[in-house]
Image: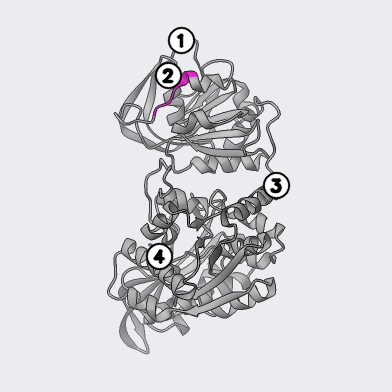
Amino acid sequence: MIPDNYVAVLDFGSQYTQLIVRRVRELGYLAKLFPYDELADLGKPGIIILSGGPKSTSDPDAPDYDLELLQSYNVPVLGVCYGMQSLNIKFGGTVESCDKREYGPAELVTDGSILYDGITQNSQVWMSHSDTVNQLPEGAQVIARNANGTPVSLQFNETYYGIQFHPEVTHSHEGTQILANFLKLGKDLVPFVIEDFKNEMVEKIKAFVGQKQVVCGVSGGVDSTVLAVLLHEAKVNMRAVFVNNGLLRKGEAAEVVANFKELGVPIEEVDASERFLSALKDQTDPEKKRKAIGNLFLDVFWDAVGDAEILAQGTLYPDVIESASNAKSKASVIKTHHNRVARVLELQEQGRVLEPLDELFKDEVRELGELLGIRKDILMRHPFPGPGLSVRCPGEVTEEKLETIREGDAIFIGKLKEHGWYDKVWQAYACLIPVKTVGVKGDERCYEWAMGLRAIISEDAMTADWVELPPFLLREVSNGILNSVPRVNRVLYDISTKPPASIEWE
């Protein structure tokens, strides 16, 4: 049951929509996400935010809603990007569709509106749109422009506002403060408390599972570990299965078993390395690799616990939004996650998939794990993809390539920990670049692989920036790899941001 005076976020398909929910939670208020076509089902919100979206307002299938219904809630409304453009049209203005998309930073020049209270003039904001407001409706006013004088923020009436940019992304430097200013217009907004969220999840788990048996796939990563401990606390009939898929990092299997023993959660270990490597043989297409791994995971689970009635997964919101796999999702597909393959979606339709963490981001999961008593060094482990090292091995996956990656990765992570950098980055890893490059070893010419290093900072995995590691550290890592890892004669450091690059190589 949704309490009164929460923040309702209507999803029009932006890849950043859940970040709005996240920012509102960071500001201390409960926020819930709804598809735009569920406007009638919001209950009694205290604030409504209309998200951005990939469509143009001029598209024949552009998302639409009833303005009178929106106004009937009698609460402040903020339209973001597409949300602002749609409000402009609804109130009687016009929007011009442009061929060229504006994407990237812009400067914000404000006029002193309450929405921009305390905001620095020429503050950087982040644009991602193609449509532009052409004519304002009667009574509306421009409350901010970009450096070129183009309107980027409107006030339609006393409580309806619009912004062309995305305040939810970190590239908008004072975006969170802008959201905070808008939320001040709400009355008695309900707070977001992680312990209340945990108690709500426990009750939902009990109601969903009942007396059925749950099989929970655990990898040792933060998400599945928190999920397993949460299910254990809910006292449901659970069997936790750890599948060694042969795509793990060096020494990881033994570490996972030891950690769960300490946590008091019984797990069953299944060594399916050969099965996974066989399934990946001769496979080079990234999507087919992911789907092969996802399908085989299900086979292994059901082979191990054939009587299981429900599959539990540690799926987080970025997995859902990037896959656009939720039946109600309005977003575009970025990539297919291993836990969103067709068979999982079929099980969802049958009511046999439990994903209690799918509204959370990584840092929120860590906060939940801390509440559950999980050791900090487990919670602060870098994210590790479900398909494992396969997404760090472009092209065909072989045991020889995997061993090369493991050795290089162990050296990189070891040096980060040695020099106090491990906890300063969101995620770091070594990957294999399956391109043979010329080199010299033992006074002889050689043609061997290049190895890539990647270290990024992020808050949510939706956007990321590369870390400026000190040169001495990179030198130590490079020397360590070139002197001790066979088949590698070149080390490269990845300085790509997301977007446009993704965090993983595949």
Q: Left or right: 282 with respect to 247?
A: left
Real-space Cα distance between discs 1 and 3?
44 Å
Under mark 4, the amino acid is: Gly
Q: Sequence order check: which comes first, mark 2 or mark 1?
A: 2
Q: Sequence order check: which comes first, mark 1 or mark 4?
A: 1
Q: Position of residue 358 (x, y in %)?
A: 53, 51
In the rendered view, tell whether residue 115 sits above or below residue 190.
above
Real-space Cα distance between discs 2 and 3?
38 Å
Asked which secondary structure carries label 3, the reply is helix
The magenta stretch is 64-68
Q: Residue at x 42, y 62 (%)?
A: 338
Mark 4 = which residue? 294
In the rendered view, tell whether residue 47 sits above or below residue 344.
above
In the rendered view, tell whether residue 312 sits above or below residue 446.
above
Under mark 3, the amino acid is: Asp
Under mark 1, the amino acid is: Glu
**Among all residues in the image, which is located at the extreme front?**
211
Mark 2 = which residue? 90
Of residues 142 and 86, the one nearer the viewer is: 86
Asked which secondary structure carries label 1, the reply is loop
Determine which of the numbered discs, if any, sits on residue 196 in the image: 3
